[in-house]
Image (cartoon, grey):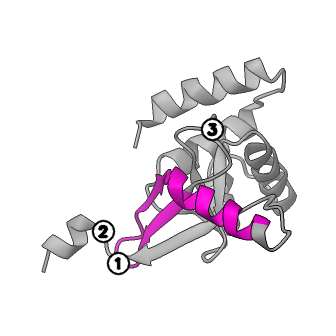
Amino acid sequence: MPDVSSLLRMAEARCHDNNVRFTPIRRRIFEIISAHSSGLKAYELLDLLSTEHASARPPTVYRALDFLLEQGLVHRIESLNAYVACPCPDHARGFQLMICRRCGLVEEMHDHDTMARLEETAAGHGFVIERQTIELSGVCQKCRQSP
């Protein structure tokens, strides 16, 4: 996973290229998410943000999250109702998330063969995939090696 400063530079460049505003609040929420290797829930973000911005409210966080999702800068972890930074927002729409059930580490992977097989199978049923989320729950290598 890239460091926070690398992720911030990537996010700033993406927002610039897309001609959208990376406001201080959006930036700070992205920075907080980027600093965590596990997903953060919206209210956890609000708690962290409110220590710096006493006026922060849920709509502030949700609007920022919607923006970050639209720009491909974060992913929503459906099973946890949490958010994690995306280290490669230019990827195709197919990606998978590996989630360690012990430490909470979330890693993004890109198995294009899996996505191609899913699209092929769906097409055989007359179905077109518009969005997919594949979440793999298990135990990461570090947790498997520790007692």
Amino acid type of the residue that numbered disc 1 sits on in the rendered structure = Arg
In the rendered structure, are the residues bearing label 2 and label 1 in contact, judged by CB atoms less than 8 Å apart? yes
Instruction: Quote the CA–CA distance across marks 2 and 1.
Output: 8 Å
Query: How far from the left and from the top, in percent, is residue 127?
Result: 84, 68
**Quarter where residue 45 is shown:** bottom right
Mark 1 closeness class: few <14, some 14–19, many ≥20 residues within 10 Å: few
Query: How far from the left and from the top, in percent, is residue 42?
Result: 69, 64
Image quadrant where one finds the C terminus: bottom left
Question: What is the number of the mark on residue 89?
Answer: 3
- Residue at x 55% of width, y 38% of height: 88
Residue where numbered disc 2 is placed: 140
Q: N-terminal of the two: label 2 or label 1?
A: 1
Taking 117 as reference, is 13 above or below it? above
In the rendered structure, are the residues bearing label 3 and label 1 in contact, judged by CB atoms less than 8 Å apart? no
- Residue at x 52% of width, y 40% of height: 87
Q: N-terminal of the two: label 3 or label 1?
A: 3
Residue where numbered disc 1 is placed: 102
Amino acid type of the residue that numbered disc 3 sits on in the rendered structure = Pro
Extreme residue toward the front, this view: 124
Question: What is the number of the mark on residue 128?
Answer: none
Instruction: Quote the CA–CA distance across marks 3 and 2.
Output: 23 Å
Q: N-terminal of the two: label 3 or label 2?
A: 3
Taking 85 as reference, is 6 above or below it? above
